[in-house]
Amino acid sequence: GNSVTQMEGPVTLSEEAFLTINCTYTATGYPSLFWYVQYPGEGLQLLLKATKADDKGSNKGFEATYRKETTSFHLEKGSVQVSDSAVYFCALTYQAGTALIFGKGTTLSVSS
Amino acid sequence: GAVVSQHPSWVICKSGTSVKIECRSLDFQATTMFWYRQFPKQSLMLMATSNEGSKATYEQGVEKDKFLINHASLTLSTLTVTSAHPEDSSFYICSARAGGGEGTDTQYFGPGTRLTVL
């Protein structure tokens, strides 16, 4: 079946450190891939997305590249800030209009 | 744009009572809305998919008679937890998808509703 696997958290970093959160997927066909972020006490917000192989999604300094050959969509940021502390969810839809399938989420904690 | 609201943001109720949660798309028409449930420190689990004007499609293991979903208009879907029990306590999140055209695979999420059943 279709599924998303994220690296286990929590991830604890110092401000300005480099961030990678790994995400791999299993899906039939060609899914669209997403990263959502959930700040403490808030709902999920779309961070970035990619809809086809080799697409790179980017937003707020975060980026992720759709790698079909490795079925991955790793999230990266060159220099994290305290305000980036949140839970990050990798997700996919395998067909436009269908519900998202989420990974378990990775908690990021950034200290100054 | 693409704002989804939920009401209430939190609710406490007694066991056996029913609770209604509203999900509204404020600046777009949502042909499809999804209801998710999130347990503490866990991922979101899809409960049901609702399309405007038709019956909701429930995921396996979700009791449709307990979690009543109505999607009466293109901007409003409601989830009613009937005869709530403590095990129904959770964070309920809705999302909405715009109908047709570019970006229809993007869902916009509401801020969630925290339900506590005593």
Image (cartoon, helix red, strand yellow):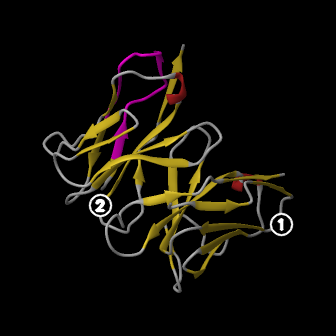
In the displayed structure, would residue B12 be above or below residue B76?
above
User: Which label sits on residue A19?
Assistant: none
Chain of the residue on which disc 2 is drawn: A
Tell me if residue B70 comes above or below residue A2 in the rendering.
below
Residue B117 position in % (x across, y down): 79, 54
Q: Secondary structure at mark 2?
A: loop
CA gap, disc 1 to disc 2? 37 Å
Q: Pick whichever, A101 or A108, lies toward us.
A: A108
> Where does the magenta region start and end?
A4-22
Residue that mark 2 sits on: A94
Which kind of residue does numbered mark 1 sit on?
Thr
Residue A93 image offset from top left, x and y in percent: 34, 58
Residue A62: quarter of image: top left
- Measuring 53% from the left and 77% from the top, which residue is drawn there? B56
Percent coordinates x, y for residue B9 in the rendering: 72, 54
Q: Is residue A18 magenta?
A: yes
Closer to the eye: label 1 or 2? 2
Q: Are marks 1 and 2 in contact (CB under 8 Å)?
A: no
Say whether residue A42 is left or right of residue A2.
right
Image check: A4 left or right of B107?
A: left
Residue occupying the far right of the picture: B14
Q: Which residue is mark 1?
A: B17
Asked if the stretch drawn in magenta spans residue B107, the answer is no
Q: Residue at x 74, y 70 (%)?
A: B82
- SS for dot 1: loop
Q: Quadrant of residue B85?
A: bottom right
Amino acid of disc 2 = Tyr
Question: Dot 2: few (<14), some (14–19), or many (≥20) neighbours within 10 Å?
Answer: many
Residue shown at 50% from the left, 61% from the top: B2
Question: Residue A20 placed where, x, y %?
Answer: 34, 26
